[in-house]
Image: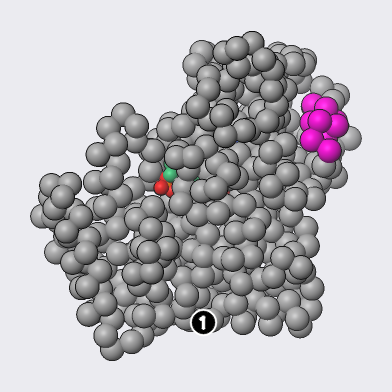
Amino acid sequence: MKMDILLGLQWGDEGKGKVVDVLAPQYDVVARFQGGPNAGHTLEFDGIKHVLHQIPSGIFRENILNIIGNGVVLDPVVLRKEIEGLHKFNISFKKNLFVSKKATIIIPTHKLLDAAYEKSKGDKKIGSTLKGIGPTYQDKIGRVALRVGDILAPDFEDKYNALVEKHKTILSFYEFDLIHLPELEKTFFEAVEFFRTLNLVDSEYEVNGYLDSGKKVLAEGAQGSLLDIDFGSYPFVTSSNTMAAGACTGLGVAPSKIGEVFGIFKAYCTRVGSGPFPTELFDEDGEAMRKEGNEFGSTTGRPRRCGWIDLPALKYSIMINGVTQLFMMKADVLNIFEEIKICTHYELPDGSRVDRLTYELNTQDAKPIYKTVRGWFTSLAEANDYDKFPVELRDYVSLLEDELGVPIKMVSVGPDRKQTILR
Ligand code: GDP
Ligand code: IMO
Ligand code: MG
């Protein structure tokens, strides 16, 4: 068996949680491969909305194993809170949740460092979620981080203290106030105690074993390709490889074992945090999109920046990920527009037109060039079949498919599990 991957093609929040939940019954295992509590993946069914941060989005489906892979940076405090918050839903975490011993642990001072670094950047700040993601990946690459398996060793506290000492030196350079550290540490160590009771495994053996025995595995991405540490709009990115290759390193699965790559995108664009966003709307259309799409961050509650769909960016994401199927999300949000704009190119200050996300593009003022199409301007509440979609929506889908060269196999018309139209 090959492992399929589902990932976001824009700046995150495309609707990955919803789609993983919809697809999960077709799989035996769902595995997160990167990111951490910066993610907020929303699922809706039976009138209840759930937001998951670190737990994979297959958790609400019975008999599906959920794995948090080695590529993830994990906050034990957040994990404990998530698990406890789900107690009333009778989920068997003992049976259905596994955590890689090689995943990296976020400790309290990572969050303080995140805040200190952001503060020091002033108006050049990244807009980090302040969950400690950057500093934790920094320590991982710097070969000083703590890993999940370390919590089982008798010298865990020594290792912890050694790392905290390093962090304190940096924090004192930034004159950062450590007054809250003791209480943060207390909560952290209580969460570590709880963490020791979970299934801690060498997940690369588990995942490869499942694939070898013919079981189906879906890798769940976090963030989006345009936030990838190598290919995103650096430095306004997250600190992991959010792209398909990240699923190989983040789970220990060889590239030859990758099957389908599901690329998901909104019918428009959003972004939280700083960084370039060529199609961003600052007018009433952007405001209307935010309102209609309820575009407020699932993790931080921040208003998301909104704009029209960006084809050069999508083409780039499709290229670096080898996307085999596209899923278009939140089509219903565009119901309110008589006309819809599609960015096909960018115009640079020297008047030239480009459709590539080059290194230089990041530093230039790229003005979007749009093609305008007629909107469907009607509710999609009754649209439970692709053939019943308004013709303008089917034309929109066809136009995107022609431009992107990959079939759009799913269109999502609302946040609920059921509001998902397969083609
Ligand atoms: P993720 O991070 O990619 O999982 O996405 P988020 O959960 O952060 O953000 C997506 C938001 O859009 C959530 O509030 C979802 O409930 C919602 N959503 C997902 N699909 C649709 C859709 O087709 N239509 C509408 N209106 N909302 C959707
Ligand atoms: P999901 O998985 C949207 C953004 C932050 C910030 C930048 C760096 O829900 O799609 P970080 O905390 O990672 O150092 O922040 O990345 N960001 C996200 N934006 N969705 C996410 O996750 C995000 N995770 C991080 O807003 O701009
Ligand atoms: Mg999200």
> Where does residue 222 sit, x and y in percent of width and height?
55, 53
The residue positioned 57% from the left and 52% from the top of the image is: 242
190 lies above or below 44: below
Question: In the rendered image, is residue 156 in sight?
Answer: yes
Res 220 → quadrant: bottom right
> Where does residue 391 sit, x and y in percent of width and height?
86, 24
Q: From the viewer's perspective, is 358 left or right of 324?
A: left
Q: Secondary structure at mark 1?
A: strand
- Disc 1 target residue: 201
Q: From the viewer's perspective, is 379 left or right of 406?
A: left
User: Quick one: quadrant of the C terminus?
Assistant: top right
> Where does residue 179 sit, x and y in percent of width and height?
10, 55
216 lies above or below 35: below
Count neighbours of disc 1 (C-alpha within 10 A) and say few if under 14, some if 14 to 19, many if 20 or more.
some
Magenta span: helix, strand or loop, mainly? helix
Q: Residue furthest top?
A: 351
Res 410 → quadrant: top right
> Where does residue 326 sit, x and y in percent of width and height?
76, 44
- Between 146 and 107, the residue placed more toward the observer is 146
Q: Residue furthest right?
A: 387
Query: Does the magenta portion include 2?
Result: no
User: Quick one: quadrant of the N terminus?
Assistant: bottom right
The residue positioned 53% from the left and 22% from the top of the image is: 364
Residue type at mark 1: give it: Val
Query: Does the magenta portion include 397?
Result: yes
Residues shaded magenta: 396-405
Queried on whether the Cβ of the residue with tag 1 lies below 8 angstroms from ligand 2, the answer reads no
Q: From the viewer's perspective, is 111 left or right of 311?
A: left
Q: From the viewer's perspective, is 152 left or right of 404?
A: left
Q: Residue furthest bottom?
A: 154
Res 269 → quadrant: top right
